[in-house]
């Protein structure tokens, strides 16, 4: 009698291809109910926003003293990002950094049913953002020009990327640095008028995938690829043979008229955890330790003259 | 606009490599101060390789973790060409892991 156990009986089965709705346009006023509903129904949601909607009015004021005052008000909301934000000298980068962090904190606060200021946004060694203390929810962030994009999933890993449709890649040095031989061959057969948009789509797919696996720009984009024009997008090896299974899903949309947005989703296949409210998700041992520390600090405060 | 910026920064680094002096803007950070995004960084690597062939083919994944500012990048390029010549890029390992923010 064979003692071998089929892998499929011990490993979670890959879920059916992830279903993703169209990205949801959000402002600080919402619609957060829609975001929560999308996440409950589809386990993942992609949000997008206009930069101007997420910049506090005080940040648009002129003058150093006004800005310094406005900055100090942001410290509690930005948390560990505040020092980095304050040190940025490029005003465009600074604005996008601030707006994208506010969007991310509001989005995470909405889905975790917590206040944005209580969201602990942290970074892994490669720079990948995550919600500290809420491992069941994965997030990703992208921003370019006036667009901000956030991806949220409760099923695995997510990566998002956005780029202007008009960004010129065809014929640039970048084209050679991002395409596999198979992709180069496929793109050469495409109508020249559609090549640049195909390259922009490829770029965002690769960025999204690389972010989802936590590599970002440290991953060589010529070592994996996609088939432009394929009905179902999947990761391919440089020679065009399949490189990943059904646990990965990809989607690309045109957003706000001028932007290409792609998402990469990895489904762990462990099923849903519909209740992701922060109160439910916090590890009980960690909560106990935090409460013990708070009681100790309070006791120390009372006994110290 | 971005091409002018890339030209200016590449000129600064190449001049520093040729003179042995620090670059004029050595403390400028590529993202936080100069606003270079992922695609600009890729173009920038190509520009540096063109301007200074002795650097060989510079690939962003090999270098992105070492690009805190212009001075750091110049030091890395200088050390790599002095140590191992044009193939230096292949031996550049991982650095401080700051790659993904620029991918945002």
Image: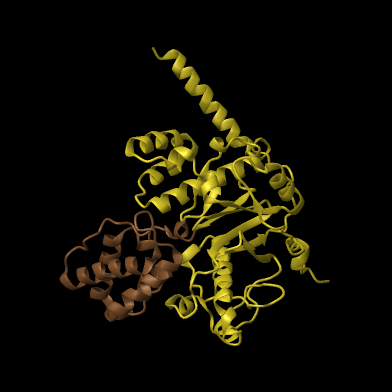
Chain colours: A yellow, B brown
Is residue A149 in sight in this rendering? yes
Residue A111 lies left or right of residue A301; in this view the side is right
Q: Quadrant of the C terminus of chain A?
A: top left
Is residue A132 in sight in this rendering? no
Residue A201, given in percent of the width and then of the height, sits at: 58, 71
At 50% across and 75% down in the image, what residue appears? Answer: A178
**Nearer the observer, B84 or B78:** B78
At 40% across and 73% down in the image, what residue appears? Answer: B59
**In this rendering, is residue A198 above or below B72?**
below
Residue A240, given in percent of the width and then of the height, sits at: 62, 82
Toward the right, the furthest residue is: A1
Toward the top, the furthest residue is: A305
Residue A243 lies left or right of residue B101; in this view the side is right
**In this rendering, is residue A111 above or below B83?**
above
Residue A263 lies left or right of residue A38; in this view the side is left
At 60% across and 84% down in the image, what residue appears? Answer: A191
**In this rendering, is residue A32 above or below B6?**
above
- Residue A9: image quadrant is bottom right
At 45% across and 68% down in the image, what residue appears? Answer: B39
Tally of marks: 0
**Nearer the observer, A192 or A127:** A192
Q: Quadrant of the N terminus of chain A?
A: bottom right
Residue A117, given in percent of the width and then of the height, sits at: 54, 36
Residue A119, given in percent of the width and then of the height, sits at: 56, 39
């Amino acid at each position: 009698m064979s003692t071998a156990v089929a892998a499929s009986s011990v490993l979670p089965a890959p879920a059916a291809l992830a279903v993703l709705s169209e990205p949801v346009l959000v402002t600080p006023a919402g619609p957060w109910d829609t975001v929560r509903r999308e996440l409950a129904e589809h386990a993942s949601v992609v949000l997008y926003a206009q930069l101007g909607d997420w910049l506090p009015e005080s940040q648009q004021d002129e003058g150093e003293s006004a800005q310094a005052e406005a900055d100090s008000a942001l410290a509690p909301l930005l948390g560990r990002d505040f020092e980095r934000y304050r040190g940025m000298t490029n005003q465009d980068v600074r604005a996008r950094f601030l707006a994208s962090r506010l969007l991310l904190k509001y989005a995470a606060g909405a889905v975790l049913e917590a206040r944005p200021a209580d969201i602990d946004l942290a970074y892994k060694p490669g720079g990948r953002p995550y919600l500290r203390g809420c491992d069941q929810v994965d997030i990703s962030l992208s921003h370019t020009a006036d667009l901000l994009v956030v991806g949220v999933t409760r099923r695995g890993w997510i990566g998002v990327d956005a780029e202007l449709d008009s960004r010129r890649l065809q014929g640039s040095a970048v084209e050679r640095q991002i395409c596999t031989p198979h992709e180069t061959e496929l793109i050469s057969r495409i109508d020249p008028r559609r090549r640049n948009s195909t390259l922009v789509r490829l770029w965002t797919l690769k960025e999204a995938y690389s972010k989802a696996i936590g590599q970002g720009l440290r991953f060589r984009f010529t070592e994996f690829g996609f088939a432009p024009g394929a009905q179902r997008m999947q990761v391919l090896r440089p020679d065009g043979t399949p490189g990943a299974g059904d646990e990965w899903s990809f989607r690309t949309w045109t957003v706000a008229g001028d932007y290409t947005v792609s998402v990469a989703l990895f489904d762990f296949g462990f099923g849903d955890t519909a209740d992701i409210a922060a109160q439910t998700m916090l590890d009980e041992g960690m909560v106990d330790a935090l409460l013990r520390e708070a009681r100790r600090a309070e006791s120390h405060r009372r006994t110290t003259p | 606009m971005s091409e002018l910026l890339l030209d200016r920064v590449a000129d600064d680094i190449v001049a520093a490599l040729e003179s042995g002096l620090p670059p004029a803007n050595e403390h400028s950070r590529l993202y936080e101060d100069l606003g270079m995004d992922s695609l600009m960084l890729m173009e920038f690597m190509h520009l540096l390789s063109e301007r200074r062939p002795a650097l060989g083919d510079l690939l962003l994944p090999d270098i992105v973790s070492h690009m805190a500012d212009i001075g750091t990048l110049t030091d890395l390029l200088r050390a790599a060409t002095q140590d191992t010549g044009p193939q230096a890029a292949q031996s550049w390992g991982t650095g401080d892991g700051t790659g993904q923010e620029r991918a945002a």
